[in-house]
Image: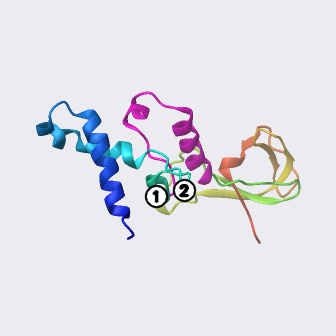
């Protein structure tokens, strides 16, 4: 490997030498030296070895106790990746989730959705006003999370 392993070992040895008081306790500092080596940026690649292997930066132990902006942004990105964006336009046919518990003898075989309904008006916050197929408008708006499109 053109001496890459030897260079890495030399750099880890230098880190351990700076951290230890006596040469006998080098094994106690090895984990910290490896963490420092893996999370420091190399000038040749401009990235850390950890980020080259895993595709993201390592979370340092101190960042677990005191969250940094990088960790918060990563958590927000992971959450937003799983959010299903739904767009409803006036005139779309939708099914509304049954949110209230009704005494039903069918148990788990009871209907999970009501409908179909017609979308009358949509608002920016996700609220939607529905009407029946007969044109009777519902008084209360419904959240878009409780709807799914109906395809006849």
Please state which of the two labelled residues, at mark 2 or mark 1, is closer to the viewer. Answer: 2
- The C terminus sits in image quarter: bottom right
Q: Quadrant of residue 9?
A: bottom left
Q: Which residue is mark 2?
A: 45
The residue at the point 51 percent across, 52 percent down is 56
Cα–Cα span, label 2 and label 1: 15 Å
Residue in the picture at 39% in, 31% down: 62
Residue situated in front as seen by the camera: 126 or 100: 126
Q: Residue at x 14, y 38 (%)?
A: 23
Q: Is residue 137 left or right of residue 6?
A: right
Q: Between disc 2 and disc 1, whose residue precedes?
A: 2
Contact between labelled residues 1 and 2, with CB atoms less than 8 Å apart: no
Residue 112 is situated, as x and y percent measured from the top left of the image, at: 58, 57
Q: Which mark is residue 54?
A: 1
Given residues 68 and 44, the one toward you in this image is 44
Q: Residue 142: x and y, percent?
A: 73, 43
Left or right of residue 29, residue 131 in this image: right
Determine whether 30 is above or below 18 in the image: below
Looking at the image, which residue sits at the far left?
24
Q: Give how far across and how far down residue 29 sits, in percent.
A: 23, 39
Q: Residues within 10 Å of mark 1 (few under 14, many from 20)?
A: few
Badge 2, how many Cα within 10 Å: few under 14, some, many 20+?
few
Q: Main secondary structure of the magenta part?
A: helix
Place of residue 89 in the rendered image (x, y in percent of width and height, measured from the top left):
85, 54
SS of the residue at dot 1? helix
> Magenta stretch?
55-82
Colour scheme of the rendered structure: rainbow
Q: Secondary structure at mark 2?
A: loop
Whether the magenta-drawn stretch holds residue 61 is answered as yes
128 in magenta: no
Q: Which quadrant would the N terminus be assigned to in this image?
A: bottom left
């Amino acid at each position: 490997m053109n001496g890459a392993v030897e260079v890495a070992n030399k750099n880890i040895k230098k880190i351990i030498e700076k951290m230890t008081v006596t040469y006998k306790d080098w094994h106690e500092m090895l984990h910290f030296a490896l963490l420092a080596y893996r999370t420091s940026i190399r000038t040749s690649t401009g990235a850390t070895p950890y980020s080259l292997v895993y595709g993201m930066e390592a979370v340092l132990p101190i960042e677990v106790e005191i969250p940094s902006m990088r960790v918060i942004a990563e958590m927000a990105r992971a959450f937003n990746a799983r959010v299903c964006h739904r767009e409803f336009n006036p005139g779309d046919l939708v099914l509304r989730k049954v949110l209230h518990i009704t005494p039903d003898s069918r148990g788990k075989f009871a209907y999970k959705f009501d409908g179909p309904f017609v979308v009358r008006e949509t608002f920016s916050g996700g609220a939607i006003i529905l009407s029946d197929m007969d044109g009777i408008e519902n008084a209360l708006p419904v959240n878009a999370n409780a709807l799914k499109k109906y395809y006849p």
